[in-house]
Image (tube, helix red, strand yellow):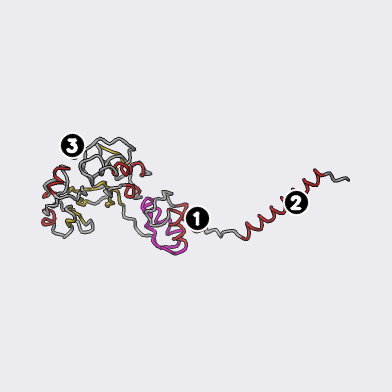
Amino acid sequence: MEFTPILIAVAIVAGLGLLLGLGLAVASIVMAVPVDKKAEEIRECLPGANCGACGFSGCDGYAAALSKGVTKNTTLCAPGGNDVSQEIARIAGLEAGTVKPMAAVVLCQGIKSNCDTKMVYQGIESCKMAKQLFGGPKECIYGCIGYGDCVKACPYDAIHICDGVARINPLACRACKQCVKACPNSLIKMMPLHETKAAVLCANKDKGAVTRKECKTGCIGCMKCVKTCEFDAIKVENFCAKIDATKCTGCGKCAEGCPTNAIQLITLN
């Protein structure tokens, strides 16, 4: 049989393909990454929000940390709640902790009737972008800007803009904290569900006389709430009251005495 140049070329290419295929097969065996089956099983029971609320790099990171013993805390997945905590404990052979249900709250009452606008903003509808221009279009530069960065960040459709201020449905919120990260004014805080707590719905840091001009319901730092509270739960910093939820009993005396209604009793149900 006479070998033509074409047959020789085909044979060479086929031989090279066979050698390369064998090389890849050997490499895949030698360089194979061991599969962590426990981590994979834990990952499957996580909700897949990849929010990072657990403190790790998403669901994969949390699953790997549990599997390797980096953490034994089964309660770090807030979106998954107690069901996920118990499932993790079963897979990892750990004791299941109890997840305290939480929901996000926007600490601002700067609706249009309470807070005037100082300019007409025309640009990208983003709180972060609008803030770059004189602190945003509202008189109060510390309040909710109202362009919905938190709305876009929420994977559970729990947030909507109502009269210029973001409002969160506590029953739809899964405490993933994506909205907390998205708010450029750091107005969104986590509060416990099914508990009554007092909250200062303001973050204004101006002196009282200036705050009164900016918002009807702004905290003026008058200290009345501090004097009223019997549990040392309230401090005034930078002319704005702050409430320690761990000390607050929900008695409501601070809210009753607040002259601007900046403090409200909140029950998330």
Residue occupied by mark 2: 15
Indicate which disc, 1 or 3, sits on the residue closer to the N terminus.
Answer: 1
The answer to which quarter of the image holds residue 159 is: top left
Nearest to the eye among marks 2 and 3: give it: 2
Q: Please say whether residue 92 is one of the residues in the magenta stretch.
A: yes
The answer to which quarter of the image holds residue 115 is: top left
Marker disc for residue 22: none
Mark 3, other Cα within 10 Å: few <14 / some 14–19 / many ≥20: few
Q: Is residue 211 left or right of residue 58?
A: left
Q: Residue at x 75, y 48 (%)?
A: 14
Q: Could you tell me which secondary element the residue under label 2 belongs to? A: helix
Residue occupied by mark 1: 40
Q: Nearer the viewer, residue 131 or 163?
A: 131
* C-alpha distance separating marks 1 and 3: 52 Å
* C-alpha distance separating marks 1 and 2: 39 Å
Going by the numbered disc 3, the residue's amino acid type is: Ser
The spot of residue 105 in percent (x, y) is 27, 47
Q: Could you tell me which secondary element the residue under label 3 belongs to? A: loop
Q: What's the magenta region?
A: 68-95
Q: Is residue 119 above or below residue 93?
A: above
Q: Nearer the viewer, residue 43 or 257?
A: 257
Going by the numbered disc 1, the residue's amino acid type is: Glu
* C-alpha distance separating marks 2 and 3: 80 Å
